[in-house]
Amino acid sequence: MKTVHTIKELREHLDQAPARPVFVPTMGNLHEGHLALVRRARELGAPKGAPVVASIFVNRLQFGPNEDFDTYPRTLERDAQLLAQAGCDVLFAPSEAELYPQPQGYKVVPPTELADILEGAFRPGFFTGVCTVVHKLFNIVQPGTAIFGKKDYQQLMVLRNMVQQMGLPIEVLGGETLRADDGLALSSRNGYLSPAERSEAVQLSAALRRVQEAVVAQRAAGGLSPDSLALLEQQAMATLASRGWKPDYVLVRRQRDLLVPTAQDLAAQAPLVVLTAARLGSTRLIDNLEL
Ligand code: PAF
């Protein structure tokens, strides 16, 4: 695997490639979830000889003023070893001066109805930061395919929408969330948890499972309604709060656009997803489950 830090080196390297890369953008501190995306990229790229490119860049633009930009774990050497083992061909790890030589005045602002709900409601400007850096990385890497984890469900949807509306010739794929044995979704931020918090953290996915089970049961009994969903959301929030969590949201939404399901959607069995974000101590975790 080749590690490059500048756009020029990256372009020189990729200009020889027989096909456009399969790209896995990350912020580093990699875990099995990222590596599964890289292995998938390897499989997808192999028939055409498309190189697998991963990027590691902790993107200041997507962090709020009181968020963890400064403390976000930077583990480049270890990450590079893991990427090489997983079949990555090129690691692009630019410095901040390389990616943002001037303050980034041009931004990609996603539509409010998709980006100012759920995560966007609690992290103002987050998706503008994500879209801006991913659009820029797409221009630099020029991938044919890009893969993002489904744990960041809304991010995947926003980025798919950006690619479609901007006419970018890139196929966007979602990779399944990987979980620890107890159900906790793998995340770089799990490393912030104390041992006691780590044992408690299982409760987040457990809360989603309970919502899922209740929705399945109510569907079978014909009792699923917007009101019954709202009650399930409130119960999940209350359970987490009673255990010492500070939940931002537990919400059941339509998979297709993340809007609130109507009675007609429920009658038509429209695919749903339950999404959550909650703080345990000083660590904010997110998770979701398709229903
Ligand atoms: O999901 C992430 O790690 C980041 O939001 C991304 C897509 C690499 C953009 O910085």
Image (spheres, grey):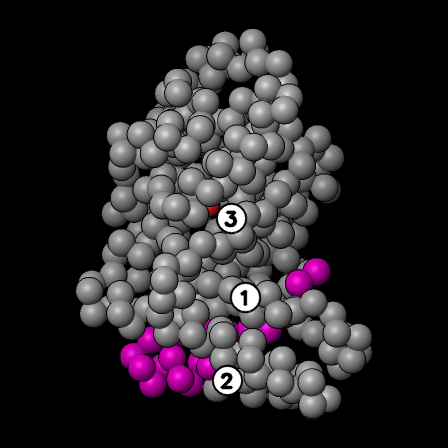
Place of residue 94 in the rendered image (x, y in percent of width and height, measured from the top left): 39, 26
| Res. 49 in view | yes
Please give left or right for residue 219 compared with residue 35 in the image.
Answer: right
Taking 232 as reference, is 236 left or right? left
Q: Return the disc, 2 or 1, that comes first in the chain's sequence.
A: 2
Q: Could you give the CA–CA distance between mark 3 and mark 1, rounded to whole angstroms?
A: 13 Å
The quadrant the N terminus occupies is top left
- Binning the other alpha carbons within 10 Å of mark 1 as few (below 14), some (14 to 19) or many (20 upward) gives some
Query: Looking at the picture, how far across and down is residue 39, in whole percent?
Result: 49, 36
Callout 2 touching callout 1 (CB < 8 Å): no
Kind of residue at badge 3: Gly
Part of the protein shown in magenta: 236-256
Nearest-to-viewer mark from 2 and 1: 1
Which residue is painted at 36% across and 81% down in the image? 241
Q: CA distance from mark 2 to mark 1?
A: 17 Å
Which element is circle 2 on?
Answer: helix
Under circle 1, the secondary element is strand
Give the residue displayed 44% in from the left and 13% down from the top: 9
Q: Which mark is residue 8?
A: none
Residue 271 image offset from top left, x and y in percent: 70, 67
Q: Quadrant of residue 6?
A: top left
Q: In the image, is the residue at mark 3 within 8 Å of ligand 1 by its beta carbon?
A: yes
Which label number is shown at residue 289? 1
Q: Which mark sits nearer the N-terminus, 3 or 2?
A: 3
Q: Which mark is drawn over residue 149? A: 3
**In the rendered structure, does residue 281 fall within the stretch colored magenta?**
no
**Which amino acid does the dot numbered 2 rest on?**
Gln
Q: Could you tell me which residue is drawn at 70 percent across and 60 percent down?
A: 256
Residue at image mark 2: 234
